[in-house]
Image: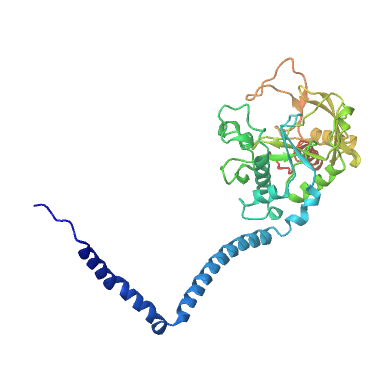
Amino acid sequence: TKKEPMSSSSSLGRLQLVAVTFILPYLIGLLLSPHLIDEDHFSRHTELHSETTTELHSDESSVNNSQERKFVSKCKDFSNILPSSLLQGISLSLHQNGNVDVCGSMMADLSVFEQALESFDKCVTTLDKYHFESWLTVVMNHRVTTCGATDLENPVASGFLGFCDRGTEKTPILLDHDYLVRIPSTDSLPCHFHTREGLRVTNLKELKKLLETSQTSPSCDAKNESSCDVQFPSLDLYAVPAGRVFMFAPKYVGEIFEIPRVKGDRGAPISLEVLSTKPRVFEIYNFFSRTESTNLVNRALKEKTESHRIKRSTTGAVGKNVFSKRTSESGFDTHGKVSIEVKQRCFKILGFDQYVEGH
């Protein structure tokens, strides 16, 4: 059947019904609410919301302040040892072990040093040498991007970290291998760092001394005087991969490496003169005295044990074969006072910071 159109009077009636049902109760409630509900209820609700919001912001602020206080408490001596004024304008120039050329550099930056500390539980001022070397590896990795393991097809880590950790097959296991502190973010092994003369940098105070010295020793090449026209403070550090030993990086024949930290003949400082760069050959001055050499010879002559006494030199790793063309004789003094002193001296020259008998 066909529906008839709704009349205007019918529509008006429906609107009146909606008004009575919904709008009229709302108006009545609006008029009566001040008498039924305390006005303070609304103000307290507003205040409560405001307080809650303030507490949330306060909690966030307290977390940030707590983290900042934790860092300050953990590293309260950090900025005292390495103040920003000391770091200003100093470049850290990084060499790969045994290489003359700089592979990358960064400006000494307190914020970068502090950022690298976030991965460690202790402040660098209290770290042992293995944690310190791990921290310094992280610092260099943050800013130096051109010192990667370019000679490896598949390095275990990217960038500088891949140079420091050469992988299981290319990392010799030295006596202190188990003490190495891996990089927290990658679980890779760290580098250790040396000066041009082989000094192993093992703590923050040593780093500070080197930075102070670099401020008064502009970086330039003694063989190329023109390079000294523009003088700038720079600290050269030589990165040595885990499991490897330091190698000197001679530039030219006749170059001198002064090693004042190692005393030789009658307390005189030892120095090395480069005789050849490839292979590396050095003449060592003041390594030991005539008195020390006489002592070594006399002890060897008195040695009675079969393995150490003076006798015909042999050849071969096993069997100790006598070769007719090798006519020398040899003997050993391994545990005498002078022999141990000479061995310790040798270790220091080669960049070892400690001597281990039987290494």
What residue sits 70% from the left and 23% below the top? Answer: 314
What count of labels does the image hold? 0
Visual colour scheme? rainbow
x and y percent of residue 268 in the render?
A: 90, 39
In depth, the one of 163 and 14 nearer the eye is 14
Q: In this view, does 187 lie to the left or right of 323?
A: left
x and y percent of residue 61 in the render?
A: 59, 63
Q: In this view, does 223 lie to the left or right of 47?
A: right
Whether residue 197 is visible here, answered yes or no, is yes
Q: In this view, does 187 lie to the left or right of 194?
A: left
In depth, the one of 257 and 298 nearer the eye is 257
Q: Is residue 138 left or right of residue 39?
A: right
Seen in the picture, residue 122 relative to 283 is either above or below; the reply is below
Query: What is the quadrant of residue 60 in the picture?
Result: bottom right
What residue sits 64% from the left and 25% below the top? Answer: 317
What residue sits 17% from the left and 56% below the top? Answer: 5
Query: What is the quadrant of residue 236 in the picture?
Result: top right
* Identity of the residue furthest to the top in this view: 325
Seen in the picture, residue 285 relative to 47 is either above or below; the reply is above
Query: What is the quadrant of residue 342 in the picture?
Result: top right
x and y percent of residue 24 in the render?
A: 31, 75
x and y percent of residue 355 in the render?
A: 73, 42
Whether residue 128 is visible here, answered yes or no, is no
